Each structure stands twice: as C-alpha cells, then as structure tokens.
Image (spheres, helix red, strand yellow):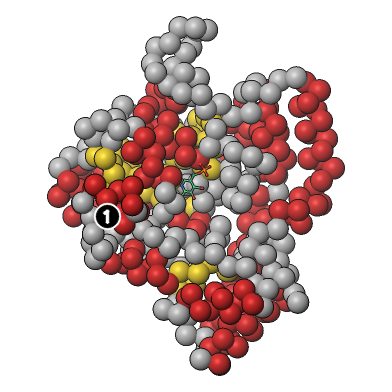
Amino acid sequence: MKRIRLLDLPALHAPIRDRLHQTLAEVIDSGQFILGPQVEQLEIEIARYCNARFAIGCGSGSDALYLTLRALGIGQGDRVITTPFTFFATAGAISRTGARPVFADVDPQTLNLDPASLLAAIRSSGRPSAVIVVHLYGGAADLDPIRDLCREAGCALIEDAAQAIGAEYKGTRVGSLGDAGCLSFFPSKNLGAMGEAGMVLTNDPQLADTVRLLRVHGSRDRYIHEMVGTNSRLDALQAAVLRIKLQYLDQWTRMRQRNASLYTESLARSGAPVKLPRPAPYQTRHVFHQYVIRCPERDSLREFLEARGIETAVYYPVPLHLQPCYRDLGYSEGDFPIAEQAARQVLALPVHPCLAPEDIEYVVAAIHEFYSAH
Ligand SMILES: Cc1ncc(COP(=O)(O)O)c(C=O)c1O
C-alpha cells in the first residue's frame, strides 16, 4: 500500500546530506558547541530573512516566548491575552512567568485571534500587560487591528511565529511587526533543526539585550548575575544545520504553496463537502506549515485515510481554556465557540515539500472515496 507521511525528514535532507555532514564535521572539529560564531551568524541571517533588527538564538520556541515575556517585565500579577487555539507552549510560557493567561476567541476563517474578541477580552480582563498573537499553520493573523488595540490598551504585542517563518502580512515578514516575534526550529517546523532550538526577533535594542542576558542566567560578566534568568542557549550544531537549511527554505516554501494549491483546486473539483483553507481577507504570504481542512466527520475521515496509508494530524483537539491544568482559570465549554468547533473539525493533510502531485491526487481520491461511501 502507498504510504503518505505527514512529514518526511530523511527525504527532505537526502539532497543536502553531504552539506549537512560537512557542516556538522566542521563544528565537531571546532570544539565550540554552545553559542559562538555559528550561532552569531545564524542570528544575523535569520534577522535579515525576517526583516528584524535583532535575533537572539535560544533553546526552543517555548523558551523564546518565555524569555520575551520575562524581558518585557511580565510576571506575577500580570495578565496576558492569547488564543485558546494554539499549541500549549503559547499559554504555558505565560504561566511559567507567574502571569495569568486570558483567552479570546479566534476568527472563523483564519482561526487566528479575532480582533473583536480580543477587544472584549481587553475590556473584561482589566489592563493586560501583553497580547500574544499566533500565526497558526503558517498564515498571518490580522495584525493591524490587533496592533491598534494593543497600542490603545498600552500593552506589548508578541508574535508567536513558531509555525510561520517567512510568512508575510501586507508585504512584511511576520515576527518583526510587534514588540517581539518568537520562532521555533523544532524538527517538524518549516525550518527545522536536528533537536530543540528557537529564536527571539525584535527591533528594540533594549529588549534584545535583556533577552540575551536572560538566556545565560542574567549574566553579562562571568559569575555576576544582574537578573535571575535561565539556561537557554542555542548550540552550534543546531545553528550550523539551520544555516544550511535556511538556504533552501524559500524553495521548500514554494513546494508547500504548490501542494496547497493542488489540494485546494483538486478538493474543490472533487465536490467533497469539506471546508478548505481560504485566503485571509487581507494580503498575506501563507507558508503552509499545515494544510488544514475542516469537517464534522473528521475522526471517521481520519481513520479512513489512515487505513489507506495516509497520515494526518489534529492540531489541536483540545482548546487551551479546556485543558486540565487551566481548570482554575474558571473557563468552561461554550466560552470560545469558534475555537471549540475548530478543535472538533480540523484535520491536517500532508503538505510537506517532498510530496509529488500524484501523492496529493492520491489523498484527494481517498477523501472523495470516503464521501462517496458515506
Ligand atoms: C504555535 C507554537 N508556539 C510555540 C511552540 C513551541 O516551540 P518549541 O516546540 O520549539 O518549544 C510551537 C511548536 O511546537 C508552536 O507550534
């Protein structure tokens, strides 16, 4: 049986295997494993790629969010508004600082933070210290109204761009449009390391300096600690891998975009009654970290595809306001109906750059077959 994986890293790396081996060998021979020249170069290259003045490498995307919040002075007694329809790390970072996550619902079309719901959350929660907007699946959230609301509320705007490196909002790269942007280089991301890695982007020199301090236990001079930070340094092996892979990112993104277009054309033609990802009502460059359809019979469709060798995934089945660890925040089912419905209906299809048009056709034919039989 044909097998279509959600992700195929060995296939992605095969054409650049020699370059990866070479750069890993160079780092091993250099004996410099934590921070150092590879990390510094990567920071320059990613800052340039994302149109940001500063980029600070750190241990993971989760840490990038945590370090950013800490650098903004956020902690106990603060409230930070975000979406309940994201990976747990977005809210987890808020809680790790001692601040309280406050949720606002998402827009039904883009599944990103809805400005109207954000306004309601700002009004009802008292003055928030920050808003974290997430560019889910690689599509930009509607930053203009969100930025205006943050400005009026006098709070910081953080972009969680973990899934969206290279995505654009009205012609500008995401991650550089708020006070800070956070990237994840988890191996499955569009630009993935071979382990954990993340990065903070900002145009603010003071914020950049504080993030740099916090990632090394708040220490500028050895054994003198100005702040209580953490150990969240990017390592040179990961940076070296990322520097090679960055050179292919635009090419890989184009393949993802091509695959997404093939799905959209072919699924529309097949007449399958699934909701397709539609372009946002503002200008964006979507980088298709995920291609996500929606349908009420999601779980049986998923099983049907699995039986035909097609891997799919659900990002995310439980919205964050309904997570067991957030019971004490006082939310209940029905509070964020759009996020809750999305959690019941979303299904991510394989869209990675190594898929051939025949693979997409195979997936679409299987979806068509499912609906013909039901
Ligand atoms: C939206 C979002 N935020 C944050 C993270 C956390 O990144 P990491 O896994 O590198 O800690 C991820 C990725 O896993 C993510 O998808």
- Residue toward you, 300 or 19: 300
- Residue toward you, 369 or 358: 369
Residue 46: where, in percent of width, then height? Answer: 58, 37
- Residue toward you, 123 or 86: 86
Residue located at (28% from left, 67% from top): 337
Query: From where the camera sits, is residue 176 visible?
Result: no
Query: Could you tell whether 263 is left or right of 213 in the image?
Result: right
* Quarter the N terminus occupies: bottom right
Residue 209: where, in percent of width, then height? Answer: 45, 21
**In terms of image quadrants, where is residue 92?**
top left
Instruction: Identify whether 260 is placed above or below 194.
Output: below
Q: Residues within 10 Å of mark 1 (few under 14, many from 20)?
A: many
Query: Could you tell whether 256 is left or right of 123 in the image?
Result: right
**Residue behind mark 1:** 104
Q: Amino acid at mark 1?
A: Ala
Residue 6: where, in percent of width, then height? Answer: 63, 63
Query: Could you tell whether 177 is left or right of 285 in the image?
Result: left
Residue located at (67% from left, 65% from top): 5
Tell whether circle 1 marks a residue whose Cβ is less than 8 angstroms from ligand 1: no
Query: From where the camera sits, is residue 206 visible?
Result: yes
Residue located at (21% from left, 32% from top): 77
